[in-house]
């Protein structure tokens, strides 16, 4: 069902445990993307197939076009992506674009929800 995991940078990927979740997702065969409203590309480890930064592409969350763009660059459609962000408005934007959204509040709840949605173990 799902082919890709898309995560926000600040507030999500900056959590060390989420770095490991992305690593596990990629090892399990999911494509991975970082989607950030930053002005420029943050320094991130080589864990992402795609990095989309609003300052580089000229469109920002929660605009539908940015979610469509990241899915297109991943070679899939929004309905095959799970998106994680700590800002509820951005999660709602992703859902409106067709992605399944996960509102990141705690690492534990996010990992639990991702493991259920993706049907695979992502934590130690």
Image (cartoon, rainbow, N blue to C red):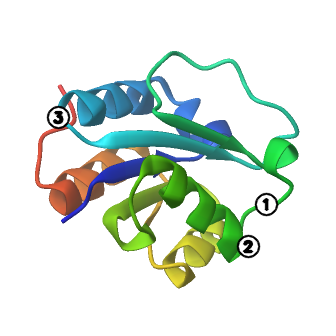
CA–CA distance in space, label 2 to label 3:
30 Å
Name the residue tied to disc 1.
60
For marks 2 and 3 on the same chain, the one whose residue lies earlier in the sequence:
3
Specify whether 35 is left or right of 53.
left
For marks 3 and 1 on the same chain, the one whose residue lies earlier in the sequence:
3
Q: Which mark is residue 123?
A: none
Quadrant (top left, top right, bottom left, bottom right) of the C terminus: top left
Specify whether 97 is left or right of 1.
right
Work out whether residue 107 or residue 48 is closer to the camera in this orientation and state it: 48
Mark 3: secondary structure = loop
Mark 1: secondary structure = loop
Name the residue tied to disc 2.
63
Work out whether residue 5 or residue 14 is closer to the camera in this orientation and state it: 5
Q: Quadrant of residue 97?
A: bottom right
- Look at 55% across and 71% down and name the residue there: 94
Residue furthest bottom as drawn:
96
Image location of residue 15, percent across then percent down: 52, 30
User: Can residue 17 be seen in this snapshot?
Assistant: yes
User: Can residue 85 be seen in this snapshot?
Assistant: no
């Amino acid at each position: 069902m799902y082919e890709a995991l898309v995560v926000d940078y600040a507030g999500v990927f900056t959590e060390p445990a989420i770095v490991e979740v992305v690593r596990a997702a990629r090892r399990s065969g999911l494509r991975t993307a970082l989607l950030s409203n930053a002005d420029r590309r943050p320094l991130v480890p080589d864990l992402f197939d795609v990095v989309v930064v609003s300052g580089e592409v000229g469109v920002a969350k929660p605009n539908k076009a940015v979610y469509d763009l990241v899915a297109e660059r991943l070679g899939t459609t929004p309905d095959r992506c799970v998106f994680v962000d700590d800002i509820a408005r951005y999660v709602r934007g992703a859902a409106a674009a067709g992605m399944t959204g996960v509102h990141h509040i705690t690492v534990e709840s996010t990992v639990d929800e991702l493991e259920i949605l993706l049907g695979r173990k992502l934590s130690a």
